[in-house]
């Protein structure tokens, strides 16, 4: 009973990853507009490239093969971690993406910690406090957090903390101090989502009949809140992990541009600007990989926390 | 229920909602008739008045070529809103159609649609939009389509879930048991009862779409430079962050206000429904 | 010991302040069982929750005193309340399936009471919890203590909740409809057990119930509540024998469990077989243990103009049988014929045509009406489906037949009372002038006085229109009032089938005897 569903979940994860690759292939290589060709043309000398040159390049990139053959070749290469060479820089796309990953992970990691501490804290305190205005104030923060454009928040932070107060550097990617403002910016929408989901979940749990039974035992509010409600409310929040990771990765495109930091987000933004298809595809597949692996991890942990579930069936999704 | 008196009392007891409605109305008006709000030219500036702070003559100040920032924000409303509406429409129409089909038809079609939805949701929306922009090319319309497609999956999923929920409802079986044909069951019983939450999602998506469209525009994938667009305006002010704070602050504030207003109205609609 | 005087409670809602309890006085002596009886909205549950300081959000004690052992509870701080709850006053809640924390082990949840009140050291609490579970009648308590709530049946979970309530050796237990979510046979066992344990410990019980029969069986004193007020109170025997208030009299007359007489004389089988069910079985594919046989070789015949009641507890297969009878479920084996026509093998189009002749009324009148339709649309929907002309006139006629005022026709289901909704559902079922009406627990979601009205309506309609009823219910008391023939189902099998008088008065099967004995109010009727 235990080993079988697990194996199926792993298989499912692999299928989703494959499907994500296929999706990116369909979008990037098959959609009208022939972005590849335009790009190839301009990369090798702009629209002035002669028809003969273009034809040669088409052949070189395999664009004259039937679609299914192109797909097969790409898939086979991708299985070996090869997404082709960057059209813009000529580097190996995979290598370019992976070398850009560590600084992004550093910012995202710090942002995740901030998001969990502050997002979770706001949700728990907002539902725990009995002072009405405190609760209202705290619980009105998350909707505000999800409504602010991150690029703007980043710029405001730079204005305030770099130019006015001179506490943190405005730009750059060296040293811990340079991490702080980008991480705060990145943490804001993520923390807001965590807070919203957890607060809603806590409110739902606190209205459940079993809470009344616990209170009838003579339990303190703290015991009711933390030993019973939070334990149950945390479960739906846990399923957000994959979504949160995706948000951080996607958010880094904007934050790294705002703070001029090196990292995956900058690479992505540059690749889109240059319509650098191989790099964009590598990023998409990497994002799907993180999503799939984290959800798999949550699936493995979930049964340990919720006795009703052996292996979670539904995969949560980005909203 | 007296229709005329109730909304007034309803709004007066909710000043935030009233303000949100006014903001949205103003932005809509700006989109259709920008000259109502400003007589200044958004494209060509007055070089002698460059980089001036906010004043009565220039509410939001002026930029590096002496263009009035307020005029640019007002004239940007049209493009930014059009992109938002297009994005939500794409997501809503295509997503709900897929969801309806999957939920009502069931079987293999359901499996296929839902697998596609799974995959669409395995990639964060912004990245998916970026991939689409890479393929489709830049421009406001392409950005809007990209944002719409990235959110299509959540509509499909919700619509399907709602159709399944309603379809398994006792009153639907009661209709079937009293001899109503499938078209009647779908049109008179399932769809009207399933649509509510999906419409609410559509209103929620308005705020998200404003944010994402402006983020893509900020990154430079929207309309080309002289044309004003909210995200691009913020990006344009980046280089003058230290000297001309108003160039980033006011356009950004506009986006934030519109998103907050849209979310507030959407919450009110959700509350009224339940 | 508990003395509630002139209590008034109201709820703050978005629509203003709504009074729930007004001027209620009540006394529970040490070791005594007192029952508060009332229909939904009577304020009985609010009174109980006020007494343990657990009013739902927005609830507020506006006036009055709740004295427990001489101390006024209404002025207690949250901290002092905590000392009273669990050791002074304990609670047995309404629905056991949602009243235990799903992610904590049973043993921990019982032991928690001991730990909160420092009645046991951490090391001993677990063993004591097992002992408490054993006392509450939980089988294999050592095993159960290590299990999670979802692994236990509803009845077992209620026993766990009783163990929790008894753990702190309280002087008073408030039992809020403690068994209404459970099957009747389980209900009786658990109430007996709870009453026994309380008697052993000298614990008083404040029993909240909608069922006068349940109150009559166990309480020394009964208080009847209606619309937030105390209607009448006094020693159970006197109150039941000679109620002084109109409302109590009506409640007593309506309580099916307290009457033995059928609503109309029972009739023998008629000459014409309308519905014939022949060795029908239904197997559902289940993800876990292969498949579940919901209905197992069931046969019966229903003659025109008569009422056959199928009785059984949850999981007995009675509803599945009814659904097969109207072609909503296809039998795995066996046949269903309606008026000589085999329903099970009928093509969809013909089955639809036949649907004009048999209709279904569901248990929950709210869920079975499209919330966006007006009542007129609800009733007219079958007419519309079969393109019957003169719809408006027919709808008005139907509303009249089921005694629905014409003013409700324009309203939405949510604006109607439960009884009115069920009338609308019945009107819809009658719209196409069917021969057979299948009634799936048509009154179990309704208050007793409304139940009586609907049952009377059904009987009148049957006589007037010559209807044939297949009546599905878990409630033998209802069967006693309405059935001509009775079939008793258990675990998918039809155990016993025959004329109502035979089955109810001279049951062949032990299970039928158990069911009959479990009808609350039995002792009163016998006395």
Image: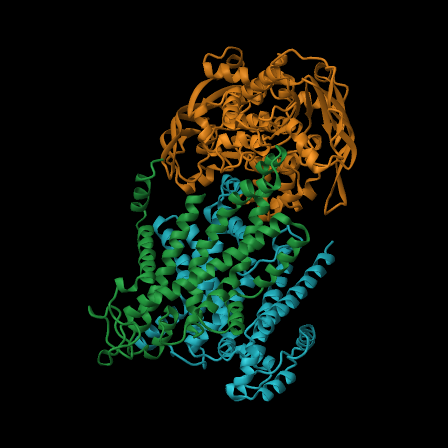
Q: Position of residue C483 (x, y in %)?
A: 66, 18
The chain letter of the orange chain reads C
Residue toward you, C128 or B49: B49
Q: Is residue A161 left or right of residue C103?
A: left
As drawn, A77 above or below C306: below
The chain letter of the green chain reads B
Seen as rendered, the residue at the extreme left is B56
As drawn, A70 above or below C395: below
Where residue A141 sits, quadrant-wise, is bottom left
Q: Position of residue B243 (x, y in %)?
A: 28, 78
Residue toward you, C197 or C194: C194
Residue toward you, C222 or B218: B218
Residue toward you, C439 or C340: C340
Q: Position of residue A58 (x, y in %)?
A: 62, 83
Q: Residue at x 19, y 68 (%)?
A: B56
Visible residue check, residue A18: yes
As drawn, C269 above or below A250: above
As drawn, C192 above or below B146: above
């Amino acid at each position: 009973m235990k080993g079988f569903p697990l194996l199926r979940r792993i298989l499912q994860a692999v299928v989703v990853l494959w499907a994500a690759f296929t999706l990116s292939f369909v979008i990037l290589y098959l959609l009208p507009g022939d972005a590849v060709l335009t790009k190839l043309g301009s990369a090798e000398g702009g629209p002035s490239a002669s028809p003969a040159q273009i034809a040669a390049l088409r052949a070189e990139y395999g664009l004259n093969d039937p679609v299914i053959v192109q797909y097969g070749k790409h898939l086979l290469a991708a299985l070996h971690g090869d997404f082709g060479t960057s059209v813009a820089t000529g580097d190996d796309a995979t290598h370019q993406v992976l070398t850009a990953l560590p600084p992004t992970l550093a910012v995202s990691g710090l942002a995740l910690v901030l998001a969990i501490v502050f997002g979770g804290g706001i949700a728990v305190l907002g539902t725990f406090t009995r002072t009405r205005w405190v609760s209202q104030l705290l619980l009105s923060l998350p909707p505000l957090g999800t409504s602010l454009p991150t690029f703007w928040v980043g710029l405001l932070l730079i204005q305030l903390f770099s130019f006015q107060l001179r506490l943190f550097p405005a730009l750059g990617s060296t040293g811990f101090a340079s991490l702080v403002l980008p991480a705060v910016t990145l943490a804001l929408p993520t923390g807001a989502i965590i807070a919203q989901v957890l607060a809603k979940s806590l409110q739902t749990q606190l209205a459940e009949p079993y809470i009344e039974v616990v209170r009838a035992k003579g339990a303190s509010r703290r015991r009711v809140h933390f030993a019973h409600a939070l334990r149950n409310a945390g479960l739906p929040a846990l399923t957000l992990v994959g979504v949160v990771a995706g948000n951080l990765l996607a958010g880094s495109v904007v934050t790294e541009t705002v703070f001029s930091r090196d990292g995956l987000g900058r690479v992505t933004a540059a690749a889109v600007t240059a319509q650098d298809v191989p790099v964009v595809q590598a990023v998409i597949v990497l994002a799907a990989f993180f999503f799939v692996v984290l959800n798999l991890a949550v699936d493995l942990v979930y049964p340990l926390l919720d006795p009703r579930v052996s292996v979670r069936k539904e995969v949560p999704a980005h909203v | 229920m007296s229709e005329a008196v109730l909304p007034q009392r309803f709004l007066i007891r909710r000043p935030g909602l009233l303000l949100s409605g006014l903001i949205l109305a103003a932005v809509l008006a700006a989109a259709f008739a920008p000259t109502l709000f400003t007589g200044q030219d958004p494209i060509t500036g007055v070089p002698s008045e460059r980089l001036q702070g906010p004043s009565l003559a220039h509410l939001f100040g002026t930029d590096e070529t002496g263009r009035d920032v307020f005029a640019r924000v007002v004239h940007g409303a049209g493009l930014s809103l059009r992109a938002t509406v297009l994005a939500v429409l794409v997501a809503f129409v295509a997503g709900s159609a897929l969801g309806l089909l999957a939920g009502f038809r069931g079987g293999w079609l359901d499996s296929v649609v839902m697998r596609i939805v799974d995959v669409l949701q395995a990639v964060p929306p912004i990245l998916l939009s970026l991939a689409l922009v890479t393929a489709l090319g830049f421009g406001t319309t392409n950005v809007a389509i990209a944002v719409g497609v990235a959110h299509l999956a959540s509509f499909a999923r919700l619509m399907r879930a709602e159709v399944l929920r309603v379809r398994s409802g006792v009153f639907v079986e009661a209709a079937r048991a009293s001899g109503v044909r499938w078209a009647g069951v779908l049109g008179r019983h399932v769809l009207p009862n399933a649509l509510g939450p999906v419409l609410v999602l559509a209103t929620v998506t308005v705020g998200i779409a404003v944010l994402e469209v402006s983020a893509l525009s900020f990154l430079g994938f929207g309309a080309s430079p002289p044309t004003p667009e909210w995200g691009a305006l913020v990006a344009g002010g980046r280089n003058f962050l230290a000297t001309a704070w108003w160039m980033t602050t006011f356009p950004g504030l506009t986006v934030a206000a519109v998103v907050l207003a849209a979310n507030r109205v959407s919450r009110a609609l959700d509350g009224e429904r339940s | 010991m508990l003395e509630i005087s002139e209590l008034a409670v109201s709820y703050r809602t978005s629509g203003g302040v709504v009074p729930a309890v007004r001027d209620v006085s009540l006394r529970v002596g040490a070791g005594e069982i007192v029952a508060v009886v009332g229909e939904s909205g009577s304020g009985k549950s609010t009174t109980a929750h006020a007494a343990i300081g657990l009013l739902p959000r927005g609830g507020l004690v506006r006036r009055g005193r709740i004295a427990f052992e001489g101390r006024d509870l209404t002025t207690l701080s949250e901290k002092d309340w905590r000392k009273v709850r669990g050791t002074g006053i304990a609670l047995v809640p309404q629905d056991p399936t949602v009243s235990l924390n799903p992610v904590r082990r049973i043993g921990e949840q019982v032991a928690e009471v001991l730990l909160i009140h420092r009645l046991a050291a951490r090391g001993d609490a677990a063993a004591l919890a097992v002992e408490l579970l054993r006392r509450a009648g939980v089988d294999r308590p050592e095993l159960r203590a290590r299990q999670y709530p979802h692994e236990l049946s509803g009845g077992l979970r209620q026993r766990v909740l009783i163990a929790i309530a008894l753990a702190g050796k309280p002087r008073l237990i408030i039992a809020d409809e403690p068994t209404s979510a459970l099957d009747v046979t389980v209900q009786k066992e658990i109430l007996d057990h709870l009453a026994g344990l309380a008697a052993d410990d000298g614990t008083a019980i404040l029993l909240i119930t909608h069922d006068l029969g349940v109150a009559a069986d166990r309480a020394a004193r009964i208080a009847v509540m209606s619309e937030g007020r105390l209607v009448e109170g006094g020693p159970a025997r006197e109150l039941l024998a000679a109620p002084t208030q109109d409302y109590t009299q009506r409640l007593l007359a309506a309580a099916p469990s307290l009457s033995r007489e059928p609503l109309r004389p029972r009739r023998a089988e008629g000459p014409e077989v309308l519905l014939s069910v022949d060795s029908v079985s239904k197997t559902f594919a289940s993800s876990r243990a292969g498949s579940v046989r919901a209905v197992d070789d069931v046969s019966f015949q229903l003659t025109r103009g008569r009422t056959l009641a199928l009785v059984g507890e949850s999981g007995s297969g009675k509803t599945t049988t009814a659904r097969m009878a109207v072609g909503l479920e296809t039998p795995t084996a066996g046949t269903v014929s309606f008026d000589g026509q085999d329903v099970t093998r009928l093509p969809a189009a013909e089955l639809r045509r036949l649907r004009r002749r048999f209709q279904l009324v569901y248990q929950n009148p709210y869920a079975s009406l499209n919330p966006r339709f007006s009542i007129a649309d609800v009733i007219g929907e079958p007419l519309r489906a079969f393109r019957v002309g003169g719809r408006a006139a027919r709808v008005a006629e139907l509303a009249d037949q089921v005694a629905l005022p014409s003013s409700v026709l324009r309203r939405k289901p949510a604006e109607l009372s439960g009884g009115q909704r069920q009338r609308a559902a019945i009107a819809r079922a009658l719209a196409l002038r069917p021969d057979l009406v299948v009634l799936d627990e048509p009154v179990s979601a309704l208050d007793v006085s409304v139940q009586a009205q609907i049952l009377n309506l059904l009987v009148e309609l049957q006589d007037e229109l010559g209807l044939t009823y297949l009546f599905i219910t878990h409630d033998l008391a209802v069967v006693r009032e309405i059935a001509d023939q009775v079939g008793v189902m258990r675990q998918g099998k039809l155990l016993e089938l025959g004329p109502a008088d035979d089955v109810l008065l001279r049951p062949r099967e032990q299970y039928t005897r158990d069911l009959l004995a479990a009808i609350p109010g039995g002792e009163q009727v016998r006395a």
